[in-house]
Amino acid sequence: MIVERNLFTPLLKLKNFKPYFTDYKNQIVRFVDLFAGLGGLRLGFEQASSNIGLKSQCILSSEIKKSALQAYTDHFKETPQGDITQINTNDIPNFDVLLAGFPCQPFSNAGKRRGLDDTRGTLFFEIMRFLLAKKPRGFLLENVPGLLTHDKGKTFSIMLSHLKECGYFVNYKLLNAKDFGVAQNRERLYIVGNLSCPIDLDRFPIAKCVFKDIQERHLELLNTPFTQKILSQFTPNELYGKAIKDKRGSNNNIHSWDLGLRGVVNQAQKDFLNLFLKERRKSKYAMLWGTPQKDGVPLSLKSIQDFFNHADLINLLDDLVAKGYLKQIKNSKNSELGFALSGGKLSFEFSKILHPNEPTPTLVASDMHKIGVIDFKNKEAGLRRLSVQEGLRLFGFPKNYGLNTSYKESMDLLGNSVCVPVIQAISKRLIKVI
């Protein structure tokens, strides 16, 4: 594997000075909080410091998103600096530990996986700038699992190489928040570095939690055409853990045609749509359409006739198009018409209904505001959205943390946040060796 080198040659000249060490007579650990978001990294680090018996002081924080800046300021009573690229290297104060949950979109499945070619991906180099400028004792970075495999591992290899060239012992591990007492199945990549020795990221104590352990009760229920329709066809027990999307998912998915959201369909049409979900993934149809295989290739009438035999197929398809379950797409290569599903999971009022006896799935910014909860009010079962307070608990934020932004903004901020208890557990090990 070829690893790019000398990307930081001008800055490496800064390594000729002695690292800054805190005067531990005052028992204060000074840290910087970069790409701070809601401050989850800071909260976890401060909790760990306090548990060990040390004071901690955030001497610089940076965040560019307006709603995150407001939330951070409201809680910590201090306003982060804005664009990190505009912070002059000469103005960076001495510090002991660097914390950064650097932007994950370039490496995540939700993003386009452009990695270091993406402008946001280059923000890793801002982390390097801070490390090279002050050579702190340690660092803790958080990102998505996709960083490990991006560009066949080359992106992550480059990052590790640069971190090690700075003189750090570097360790990394995928850890899941559901093992740290958080009611969310959220696996993330954690990278730690220290000047004196490697930091163990194995054998953390296991703590379990499920959604009902943090759920609020008897909140206001929604009464919309969608909730009326779904509750008329399914009992609460049948809805627990269901995803609502026109995609594969065995018995875990409720499809738009199951609910008749775009119009009532007959059994033959339901059978066709369920079969269509599976057949459109086959490589032979991708080849016929002239496109690389993917989950969602349009199928021509001839291709459909290969797997679905129906006396009135054309009218069946036309009716599904008219009602909006299917759409027609013209092949740019030969002008042939193909059929594709009209919408994915993001087109529905809800994308997932949580199961009370399980951790939630990974909550992401793109559709966290579409998470549904079965609740009871006046002894009647109903459906509501995940509350902001529940969202905060699902990331391990303390009870005194509040969000004064809009509902959608709050969920967007949380979906990009870190799970505080995981940060606390890692930080405790980091602090003990710095």
Image (cartoon, rainbow, N blue to C red):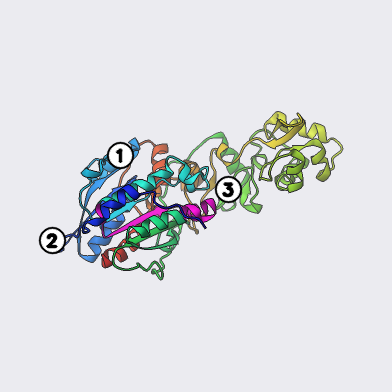
Instruction: Give amino acid for label 1.
Output: Leu
Return the x and y of residue 122 as percentages of the image width and height. 41, 44
The amino acid at mark 2 is: Asn
71 to the left or right of 238: left
Residue in view at x 41 percent, y 57 percent: 161
Camera-side residue of 397 and 72 = 72
Q: In front: mark 2 or mark 3?
A: 2
Q: Residue beneath label 1, please?
A: 69
Badge 2 vs badge 3, beta-carbon distance below 8 Å: no
Nearest to the observer: residue 318 or residue 162: 162
Q: Amino acid at mark 3?
A: Ala
Q: Which residues are magenta?
A: 134-156
The residue most toward the bottom is 203
Which mark identifies residue 193? Answer: none
The residue tagged 3 is: 243
**Of 187 and 6, the residue lying toward us:** 6
Give whichever of 73, 255 is nearer the camera.
73
- Pick out the residue farthest to the right: 311
Q: Which residue is mark 2?
A: 26
Mark 2 near mark 1, Cβ–Cβ under 8 Å? no
